[in-house]
Amino acid sequence: MNQNYLKLAKISLVLVYLVIIAGAVVRMTGSGMGCPDWPKCFGYLIPPTEAGQLEWLPQKSYQEGQVIIKDEALRVARRNFNTGTTYNETNWEPYTKHEYALFNPWHTWIEFINRLFGALAGLATLVLAIYSLKFWRTQKPITLLSWLVVLGMGFQAWLGATVVYSVLEPVKITVHMVMALVIVALLLYLIFKADPSVENHQTQKYLQTAMVWALLLTLVQIVLGTQVRQFVDGQIDLVGEHQQALWLQYPNLQFYIHRSFSIAVFLLNAYLFYTIGKNSLGYTKIKWVALLILLEILSGIAMYYLDFPWGTQPLHLVLASLLFGVQSYLVLEVSKAVRRYKSL
């Protein structure tokens, strides 16, 4: 496989992870509605930096689609026009997707950077897919999967729009996160197939099954974690963002399930670590799994017992997504070993 394709796939993967990191920061800072419209931000390609830019002003030119905040509601310019000395309602139409109409420059720019990373990741995957056309005659699955990633990025962008239109509905946030992980898994598969340096490993009975279950448990943990995060967001609204000690004073059921599942994740991966080491099977990435799980546990403990130190929330999510990626690659490695063993 061409080395240029492999480099493009790795760049795409890095950019997708940057989107995940940016999204985690958006959640931590509560910036999800920093841009209340999509794909623009308050009708701008480059968002405003101060509230005055969103006020109606006399003797000013407005472009079609540009947004202002008037009487605590969003108004959208119907066409290009110049204002007179008084506000003319006929030049504007209400924004109908939702009723959120607040401007916070920090939230706006954090969300804008998140979208910018998303656009860069989308562009990178498009370049990857176009480059994959050279393999159409010899390796059609590579080309097809490369374009499937592009479709996945498009679907992910649409999901991002629905999250904004729903004013951060929890279920849609969860689906948005899961879709990001699906894209990660697809890119890792393409990298695995394109990388000539992938080593051949030995395998053992039930190892593949255990690897797959470990991956699925991580995915379940991430889904549960997004639900716990939504509960925390609700508590922040109730008790205030500076009352961290009260955010998990009365946890919900999802929190206890999430915490209990972490024991299963730890035990299963400890079994894999022991089995691989005892039988000298290779799979050195299991050491990364062990490290990521350790850091994940420590960040979870810090959030619960140390009242959410700054940065622990996005770190917890990013570590989980990295863990999912490493485990996905391990599943590919062990699956290759199983196929090689059966062909002998």
Image (spheres, rainbow, N blue to C red):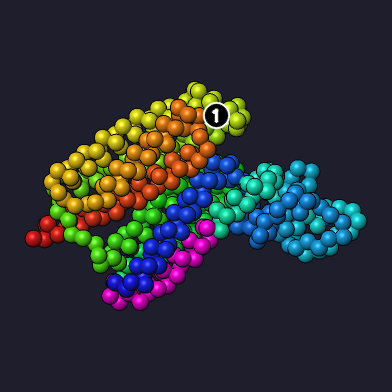
Secondary structure mostly seen in magenta is: helix
- Location of the N terminus (image quadrant): bottom left
Compared to residue 331, the image places residue 220 above or below, namely above
The picture places residue 235, in percent across and down from the top left corner, at 56, 29
Amino acid bearing label 1? Gln
157, 53: nearer the viewer: 53
The picture places residue 210, in percent across and down from the top left corner, at 22, 43
> Furthest residue to the left?
344
Q: Which residue is mark 1?
A: 244
The picture places residue 66, in percent across and down from the top left corner, at 72, 58
User: Mark 1 Cα within 10 Å, few/some/many (few <14, many 20+)?
Assistant: some
- Location of the C terminus (image quadrant): bottom left
Compared to residue 258, the image places residue 143 above or below, namely below
Numbered marks: total: 1
Going 58% across and 31% down the picture, which residue do you hit? Answer: 236
Asked whether the viewer can see residue 171, the reply is: no
The picture places residue 295, in percent across and down from the top left corner, at 37, 40
**Does the magenta run of residues contain 225?**
no
Going 75% across and 49% down the picture, which residue do you hit? Answer: 51
47, 158: nearer the viewer: 47
Going 44% across and 65% down the picture, which residue do you hit? Answer: 125
Q: Secondary structure at mark 1?
A: helix
55, 140: nearer the viewer: 55
Side of 176 where 184 appears, left or right: left
Residue extent of the magenta highlight: 117-139
**Does the magenta run of residues contain 131?**
yes
> Furthest residue to the top?
250
Going 55% across and 29% down the picture, which residue do you hit? Answer: 244
Side of 248 where 9 appears, left or right: left
Asked whether the viewer can see residue 232, the reply is: yes
Residue 64, image quadrant: bottom right
